[in-house]
Image: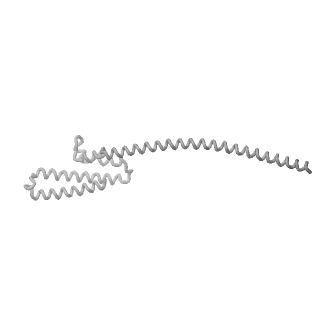
Amino acid sequence: LRNALRSIEWDLEDLDDTIAIVEKNPSKFKIDNKELTSRRNFIQLTREEVKHMKDKMNYSRGRDRDRTARQPLLESSPVRGATSHGTTKYSKLENEIDSPNRHFLDSTLSQQNQLLQAQDAQLDMISHSLCSLKTVSRQIGSELDEQAVMLDEFGSEMDNTESKLDTTMK
């Protein structure tokens, strides 16, 4: 947006230079004073609009850079206050918000939200699977503990039987 505003300022300077050239030789360009005044007024209004947008942009620089931070740039423009209905000279700028780029961005944002929801669903499934694995591993652990106790008892019985066998053999 800053680059676009700078570009507009440069274009306004070029228009000023062009009007100065036309003023020096109005008969060559067949433009009357009324038209020149109209064009000068347009340049002045556009400069005010650009300044207003820059001020708003600098004000919202610290804010989040989302659609709500850009919205004030177009809501309360001086030109808009004068002509609140119908098209203005800045309607192209206002309509850019609804341009295919905006639709593309909205579509991309929607796709990203869908991907996030799908990932959340997959993470929930993984979480449930991990809970099941945790339960199974606890059961396996308790069975191993029981079998270790049984093996210890069996080992004790083997030692006891071996000592009896040794005494019997002697």
Residue at the spot x=26%, y=56% of the render? 7
Closer-to-camera residue (80/146): 146
Q: How many marks?
A: 0
Locate residue 90, reporting x and y percent. Answer: 24, 47
Residue 42 point in image, percent of width and height = 19, 51
Q: Quadrant of residue 75?
A: top left
| Foreground of the two, 144 or 59 | 144
Q: Going by the image, does 51 lie left or right of 65?
A: left
| Quarter occupied by residue 113 | top left
- Residue 16, x across and y down, in percent: 18, 57
The structure residue drawn at horizontal position 85% and vertical position 49%, both measured from the top left corner, is: 162
In this view, the residue in front, 35 or 11, is: 11
Q: Residue furthest left?
A: 27
Colour setting = one colour
Extreme residue in the right direction = 170
Please state if 20 lies on the left or on the right of 69 as rendered.
Answer: left
- Residue at 37% across / 48% down in the picture? 66
Q: Is residue 120 above or below residue 60?
A: above
